[in-house]
Image (tube, rainbow, N blue to C red):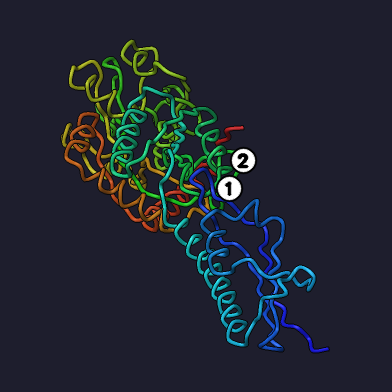
């Protein structure tokens, strides 16, 4: 008895993509063996077909491959006559159905890859709500929401110098719907001040875009005998360990910048970490000095309540206070900087990272946003993901050396 042709189509389990009903690539295995062109053909589809194949694909199959005659001769119509031409036409129709199915599977999966964003995007911020950096971050997320045509949800997750926010994003799906907004110290200094972290900053994240840079002013009380940064260095050198400075916690930039300066000058001062309110205590004379964020420091300086000794973070003097020297003018080797920006989980498609970078760059160039940044003495930044990664690597090398030398620990 002549062998009969067999067409086996196995439609495996199809993987669905999120709530927008996107269908990722289905795995289909088609084996076709034609032995006798005049023989009947049979189409076998797994039970998963009816449960998982979307209607559009099912229609493609059904349209190109009509119900097949039963292989049981007793169930066939005895009056029906099949000719060679009819059999060949039916076989061609079935093959056309297989082609239609395959094309539909691949085209649907490809279309699913390009539709972004199709649901709200969440931005996790490792900062307390309401502070200047958080306010600016929200301005960026509002700009992103408008340019992407999608809701952007902000979730503040402060704590552990930003580690809680980083950990949440590191464990998120790399689909472009969860982003991290952070200060660069989370990537350039924290990894070396903690003995162990639940994530790897080099392997679990990809840089997306920088947003802005702001500075710190070294401000001192009016009663401090030193009236300039060189005076402070002379005073501290002549009185080792007598004078102190405040910061907003171990490992933060106000702490690290001062320790970098002290190391470069080989002098010693007592560190007094604050959770908040250090500037008020400087005004009151409780603590001699602090590196204060520009948004807070500049008004106090202009009002004459404190004296400004130096500025750090801009890479130059700031136009708001052009007479205040950049710290590197007095202490060489302190020209490192900080910035804020967006990161995504590793594995996020490059096309999405590129789109986000494009939109953040547009936001940084928006005149309205630039004016808002100027109001808090911040400067907008633009960069490629590659440029951002290079700056992180460069700054991390500097802070790693300092943290090791000073044995600065956060755990």
- Where, quadrant-wise, is the N terminus in this rendering? bottom right
Q: Give SS at disc 1.
A: loop
Disc number for residue 326: none
Residue sticking out furthest to the right? 1
Residue sticking out furthest to the front? 79
Residue 129 in the figure: left or right of residue 166? left
What is the x, y in percent for residue 164?
A: 55, 33
Q: Give SS at disc 2.
A: loop
Residue 176 in the figure: left or right of residue 318? right
Residue 312 visible in the displayed image:
no
Q: CA distance from mark 1 to mark 2?
A: 7 Å
- The residue where tag 2 is placed is 197
Considering only vertical position in the picture, is 29 above or below 298? below
Circles 1, 2 touching at the beta carbon (< 8 Å): yes
Considering only vertical position in the picture, is 185 above or below 218? below
- The residue where tag 1 is placed is 200
Between residues 67 and 145, which one lies in front from this camera angle? 67
């Amino acid at each position: 008895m002549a062998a009969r042709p067999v067409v086996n189509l196995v439609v495996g389990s199809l993987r669905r993509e999120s709530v927008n009903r996107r269908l990722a690539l289905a795995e289909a295995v088609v084996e076709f063996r034609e032995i006798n062109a005049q023989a009947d053909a049979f189409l076998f589809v797994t039970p998963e077909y009816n449960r998982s194949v979307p209607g559009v694909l099912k229609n493609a199959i059904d349209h190109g491959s009509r119900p097949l005659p039963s292989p049981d001769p007793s169930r066939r119509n005895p009056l029906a006559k099949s000719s060679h031409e009819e059999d060949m036409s039916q076989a061609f129709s079935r093959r056309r159905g297989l082609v239609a199915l395959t094309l539909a599977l691949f085209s649907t999966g490809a279309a699913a890859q390009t539709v972004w964003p199709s649901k709200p995007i969440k931005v996790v911020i490792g900062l307390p709500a309401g502070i200047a950096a958080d306010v600016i971050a929200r301005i960026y997320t509002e700009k992103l929401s408008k340019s992407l045509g999608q809701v952007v949800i902000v979730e503040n997750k402060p704590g552990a110098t930003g580690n809680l926010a980083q950990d949440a994003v590191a464990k998120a799906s790399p689909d472009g719907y969860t982003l991290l907004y952070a200060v660069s110290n989370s990537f350039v200094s924290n990894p070396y001040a903690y003995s162990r972290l639940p994530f790897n900053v080099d392997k679990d994240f990809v840089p997306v875009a920088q947003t802005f840079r702001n500075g710190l002013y070294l401000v001192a009380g009016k009663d401090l005998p030193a009236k300039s940064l060189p005076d402070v260095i002379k005073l501290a050198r002549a009185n080792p360990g007598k004078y102190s400075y405040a910061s907003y916690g171990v490992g933060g930039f106000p702490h690290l910048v001062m320790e970098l300066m002290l190391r470069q000058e080989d002098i010693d001062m007592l560190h007094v970490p604050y959770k908040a309110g250090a500037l008020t205590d400087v005004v009151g004379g409780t603590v001699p000095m602090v590196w204060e964020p520009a948004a807070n420091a500049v008004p106090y300086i202009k009002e004459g309540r404190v004296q400004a000794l130096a500025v750090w973070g801009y890479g130059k003097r700031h136009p708001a206070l052009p007479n205040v020297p950049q710290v590197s003018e007095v202490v060489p080797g302190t020209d490192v900087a900080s910035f804020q920006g967006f990161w995504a989980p590793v594995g996020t498609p490059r096309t999405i990272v590129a789109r986000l970078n494009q939109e953040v760059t547009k936001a940084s160039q928006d005149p309205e946003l630039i004016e808002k940044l100027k109001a808090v003495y911040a400067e907008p930044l633009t960069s490629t993901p590659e440029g951002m990664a290079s700056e992180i690597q460069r700054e991390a090398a500097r802070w790693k050396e300092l943290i090791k030398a000073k044995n600065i620990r956060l755990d």
